[in-house]
Image: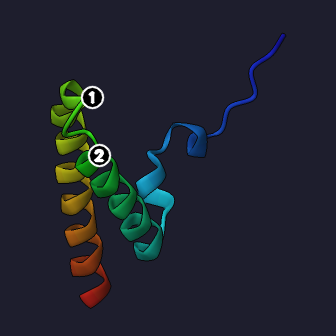
Amino acid sequence: MMLDATLSDFTPWWERASLGEVDQQLARLRVARYYCRGRAADLAPILDTHIQRLVLVREEMKCSDGD
């Protein structure tokens, strides 16, 4: 069996995404973070990390659009 991989297979999704897609994923993560307060509190730090990463990606996208 031969693997057919392209460069886009290894590119993070946010590098191919639009600003709207990043905003949508960020909103989903924030909702998930809100609901992690109780039983799934151990997931909160993981979600916080992803949220922080996406906020940085979003800011970078906004800056590059302004150039």
Image quarter (top left, top right, bottom left or bottom right) of the N terminus: top right
Identify the residue at horizontal 23%, vertical 51% (top origin).
51
Tag 2 residue = 35
Q: Where 40 falls versus 65 (above or below)?
A: above
Q: Which residue lies most toward the front here?
A: 38
SS at circle 1:
loop
Q: Where 2 falls versus 35 (above or below)?
A: above
Give the percent coordinates (x, y) of residue 15. Answer: 42, 57
Q: Nearer the viewer, residue 22 or 39?
A: 39
Identify the residue at horizontal 18%, vertical 60% (top origin).
56
Q: Nearer the viewer, residue 51 or 8?
A: 51
Q: Which residue lies most toward the bottom here?
A: 66
Give the percent coordinates (x, y) of residue 26. Answer: 33, 60
Q: Nearer the viewer, residue 53 or 34?
A: 34
Kind of residue at badge 2? Tyr
Q: Earlier in the sequence, mark 1 or mark 2?
A: 2
Left/right placement of residue 55 relative to residue 31 reads left
Identify the residue at horizontal 47%, vertical 67% (top origin).
21
Q: Is residue 67 visible?
A: no
Tags 1 and 2 in contact by the CB under 8 Å rule?
Answer: yes
Q: Which residue lies most toward the top here?
A: 1
Kind of residue at badge 1? Ala
Q: Quadrant of residue 43?
A: top left
Query: Which of the numbered marks, if any, corresponds to residue 40?
Result: 1
Left/right placement of residue 66 relative to residue 22 reads left
Give the percent coordinates (x, y) of residue 65. Answer: 31, 84
Image quarter (top left, top right, bottom left or bottom right) of the C terminus: bottom left
